[in-house]
Amino acid sequence: MVSSLSASLSASLPLVGIPACVKPINTTNFHAVNDKYIAAVSSAAGALPVLLPALGDRYDLGDLVDRLDGILFTGSPSNVEPHRYGGPASVEGTLHDAERDATTLPLIRAAVEHGVPIFCICRGIQELNVALGGTLHQRVQEVEGKMDHRSRKDWAPEDRYNAVHPVSLSANGYLRSLLPDRPGEVMVNSLHSQGIDRLAPRLAVEATAPDGLVEAVRVEDARAFALGVQWHPEHPRALSWPLSGAMFRAFGAAVAARAAARHAPPRIVQAAQ
């Protein structure tokens, strides 16, 4: 999808890759990214969005991540295929995107290994957990003791991104440090059926819902920004929330720092005389 950006973008801006979903449109497959993610990367993170087709193992991942200053892993109507984490078969009719899974899961591991900043949203946090060895609830609303985290289909599409439940930010966590002068609880939207079950070993919990579901994580040993959230901070309604803006600014600062390092002239070491 083409983003309707209000300002021209300079080629000198940091490059943020956004992996695409494969979507059938009129019997033809398209590699697509929702406009709201493109707009948030450009306006809220101050970077140039670069759409990455879902090409799976056709990528040289080391070469790809070395060309990028950050990667945003988006939400999607599709669910991560359960064989990726040893889960039972999906309920009939569940939407999957095998090409996206084959692209994003190894891409997350390569980005973390190479120190590339990553921001993972909704399906993105689920991919992050699976890529690093965790598992998922496929239908959170059917898990005993859990809330129904799906969006209200009887609401207008834009209203589904309104804040609907609180999350508690972990004490001394990264997200808590972004809002040092505010209470440790914020309201978020909720538009998902999958959710984190067993947390991947390298992840630390950054926020939880009232029912205990993990809502935000960070990669503990990452060399750069590596954050995942279950809600949608990129939506125009959510971007005005203090935490949403703070997260995108922090992501933008991380990708700008990587861009500066990538383009810095090599240091010349003088030989001892």
Image (cartoon, helix red, strand yellow):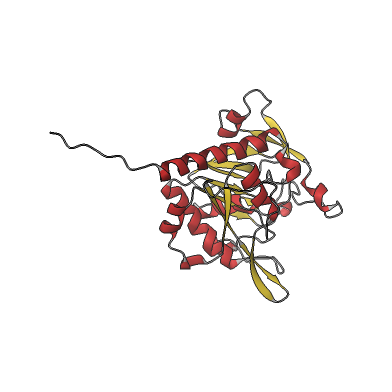
Residue 75 visible:
yes
Query: What percent of the width, then of the height, locates residue 232?
Result: 69, 46
Q: Quadrant of residue 93?
A: bottom right
Give me the residue at 73% from left, 75% from top: 26
Query: What percent of the width, then of the height, locates residue 208?
Result: 65, 39
Query: What percent of the width, then of the height, locates residue 16?
Result: 55, 50
Q: Residue furthest bottom?
A: 27
Instruction: Please name whichever residue, 119 or 204, is drawn nearer the observer in this view of the structure.
Output: 119
Residue 225 visible:
no
In this image, 4 relative to 52: left or right?
A: right
Q: Is residue 257 above or below residue 28?
A: above
Q: Residue furthest top?
A: 181
In this image, 201 relative to 49: left or right?
A: left
Q: Is residue 102 above or below residue 109?
A: below
| Number of marks present in the image shown | 0
Q: Residue furthest left?
A: 273
Query: What percent of the width, then of the height, locates residue 36?
Result: 69, 51
Instruction: Please name whichever residue, 28 or 48, is drawn nearer the observer in this view of the structure.
Output: 48
In this image, 199 relative to 235: left or right?
A: left
Give me the residue at 56% from left, 28% from top: 172
Quadrant (top left/top right/bottom left/bottom right) for the C terminus? top left
Quadrant (top left/top right/bottom left/bottom right) for the N terminus? bottom right
Q: Quadrant of residue 81?
A: bottom right
